[in-house]
């Protein structure tokens, strides 16, 4: 069997999540190729070539792929699909955007957000915000799959794959990139961080998130937020952890002033250790927390920062 | 401009989901059902585009048995002009839903199709993108801002790194994210008026599409439950536990 893995990147570096998607491909088993589609993305290609378990890196380096517009990427992937039994991408916003187009163009179903591989045609995925887990057998000849990276452990990066340059350029001409507003942060990426500290409605306003920053700096942590905090306008949506935001599974997750709605739990309950700080002893977050501290966060956070 | 808004009837987002004892599915007997929250945002966006003079007609469509007429009436009360129910008892996969919607698009010729980015039951996040591929339209997924400008629509998308704005040629597909708008509540007179708005019923079988399922659900189980841990009495104790017991900080 042969498996194509689409690489998530920003034209500069390969996202660590792709290493987990390759792990899912290894669990399926077969000859694994990575596709790097971007513009001036040679650094990404060099990184991709080192990913363990990968025999070939296919490179489509063209301005048409710079912003990974779904219309263009889906045409490229569909063109390559003939050679593969499985096509995988990480269930991040790029993959979630273009992959269903690939499935439709191939006239197959897509299996979204898999967290486990039972066999080459049977996969495990959460439904209902993770309140149920479905085991699904695909009957399609080609399997189009998005992978939730929290379900798999990253493969190592000491391999050496053959690099093959593709000369095909697919430009649908129906969409154009206008601009990006990228949230700049010196802190680690939410999805890749070993420690995440998140604030909820209890933070009361955006300024109070500075209370989390001091702790995040000491721990090397990323900062997240609940949907309630995002909806209240405290922080931007790219910080949201939950069913419709980012799914994280760090070694340590610290939930501050977060009540613990099921939609939030869906985004963090696979974390190895969960700490909850909340003044309401009945908050549902305490039912999933390994360590709960019933306290006013405005007292507890400065004290925690000083003691780390 | 005509806008088509496909909507889905799903379990209400406040309902605690339980898995059936025989592990075949979740238990949907006697639970509250609602319009999928993302679909409600799609209806609201269409209504706002009509109120601002950009859109002239809003058609809502839902695929399911007779019970989804309830959600279509809700959409009509919120401001849609007419509704189509595509009748089926089957639980169809996204690819087959997209194929049925493709036929509706061919018939209705909307300039804009607005859908929710995902349904909160199957959490697939596929239908809008699949419909875009089948109709050859460009797509603006996970939209937090939509502005129509002549024969183009600018869509600001919520992506992992922040926001991305793209320009799409019309006709186009938009899928909604949570911050696109805050849906209104239907007023009683509008609910009464919605009962008289046109609702057409078509049979899914009449579309001539092979709707065979592409997968078997082998089982549906409850997720592993986390055990509640301990309540610590002080910040000092918390730091001590994290260092020495959990060993996640040094």
Image: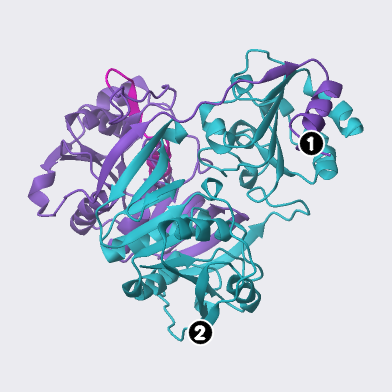
Chain colours: A cyan, B purple
| Residue A288 figure quarter | top right
Locate residue A215, reporting x and y percent.
83, 38
Percent x, y for residue A10? 62, 66
SS at mark 2 in the image: strand
- Residue marked by disc 1: A212
* Residue located beneath label 2 in the image: A165
Q: Which numbered mark, 1 or 2, is in the foreground of this view?
A: 2
**Horizontal side, residue A56 vs residue A295: left or right:** left
Query: Extreme bottom residue here?
Result: A167
Using the rendered image of the protein, determine whether residue A62 is visible from the camera's viewpoint: no
Residue B233 vertical position relative to residue A290 in the rendered view, above or below: above
Q: Which mark is residue A96?
A: none
The quadrant in which the C terminus of chain B is found is top right
Tags 1 and 2 on a common chain:
yes
**Mark 2 belongs to which subunit?**
A
Chain letter for mark 1, please: A
Instruction: Check the picture and name the quadrant holding the N terminus of chain B.
Output: bottom left
Residue at horizontal 31 percent and vertical 24 percent from the top = B20
Horizontal relation, residue A183 to residue A212: left or right: left
Q: Quadrant of residue A73?
A: bottom left
């Amino acid at each position: 069997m042969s498996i194509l893995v689409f690489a998530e990147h920003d034209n500069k570096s390969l996202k660590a999540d792709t290493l987990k998607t390759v792990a899912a491909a290894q669990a399926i088993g077969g000859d694994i190729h990575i596709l790097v589609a971007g513009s001036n993305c040679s650094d990404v290609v060099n990184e991709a070539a080192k990913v363990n378990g990968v025999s070939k890196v296919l490179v489509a380096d063209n301005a048409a792929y710079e912003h990974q517009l779904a219309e263009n990427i889906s045409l490229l992937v569909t063109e390559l699909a003939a050679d593969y039994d499985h096509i995988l991408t990480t269930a991040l916003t790029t993959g979630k955007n273009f992959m269903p187009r690939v499935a439709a163009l191939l006239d197959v179903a897509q299996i979204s957000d898999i967290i486990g591989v039972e066999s080459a045609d049977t996969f495990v995925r959460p439904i209902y915000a993770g309140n149920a887990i479905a085991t699904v057998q695909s009957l399609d000849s080609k399997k189009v799959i998005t992978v939730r990276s929290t379900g798999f452990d990253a493969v190592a990066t000491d391999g050496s794959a053959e690099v093959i340059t593709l000369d095909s350029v697919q430009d649908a001409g129906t969409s154009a990139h206008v601009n990006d507003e990228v949230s700049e942060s010196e802190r680690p990426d939410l999805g890749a961080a070993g420690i995440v500290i998140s604030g909820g409605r209890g933070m009361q306003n955006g300024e109070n998130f500075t209370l989390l920053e001091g702790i995040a700096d000491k721990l090397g942590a990323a900062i997240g937020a609940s949907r309630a905090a995002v909806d209240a306008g405290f922080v931007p949506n790219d910080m949201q952890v939950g069913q419709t935001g980012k799914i994280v599974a760090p070694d340590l997750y610290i939930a501050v002033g977060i009540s613990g709605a099921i939609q939030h739990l869906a985004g963090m309950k696979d974390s190895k250790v969960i700490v909850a700080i909340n003044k309401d002893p009945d908050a549902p977050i305490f039912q999933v927390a390994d360590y709960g501290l019933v306290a006013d966060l405005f007292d507890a956070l400065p004290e925690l920062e000083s003691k780390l | 401009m005509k806008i088509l808004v496909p909507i889905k009837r799903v379990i209400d987002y406040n309902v605690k989901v339980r898995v059936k004892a025989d592990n075949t599915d979740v238990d949907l007997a006697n639970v509250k059902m609602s319009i999928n929250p993302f679909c409600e945002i799609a209806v609201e966006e269409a209504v706002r585009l009509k109120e601002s003079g950009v859109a002239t007609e809003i058609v809502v469509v839902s695929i399911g048995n007779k019970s989804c007429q309830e959600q279509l009436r809700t959409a009509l009360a919120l401001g849609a002009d007419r509704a189509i129910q595509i009748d089926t008892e089957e639980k169809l996969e996204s690819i087959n839903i997209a194929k049925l919607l493709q036929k509706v698009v061919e018939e209705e010729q909307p300039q804009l199709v607005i859908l929710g980015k995902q349904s909160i039951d199957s959490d697939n996040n596929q239908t809008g993108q699949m419909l875009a591929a089948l109709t050859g339209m460009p797509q603006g997924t996970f939209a937090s801002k939509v502005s129509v400008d002549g024969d183009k629509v600018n869509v600001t998308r919520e992506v992992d790194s922040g926001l991305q704005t793209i320009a799409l040629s019309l006709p186009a597909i938009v899928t909604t994210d949570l911050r696109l708008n805050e849906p209104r509540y239907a007023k009683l007179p509008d609910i009464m008026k919605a009962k008289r708005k046109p609702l057409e019923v078509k049979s899914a079988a009449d579309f001539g599409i092979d709707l065979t399922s592409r997968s078997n659900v082998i089982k549906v189980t409850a997720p592993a439950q986390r055990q509640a841990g301990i309540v610590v009495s002080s910040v000092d104790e918390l730091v001590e536990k994290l260092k020495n017991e959990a060993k996640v900080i040094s």
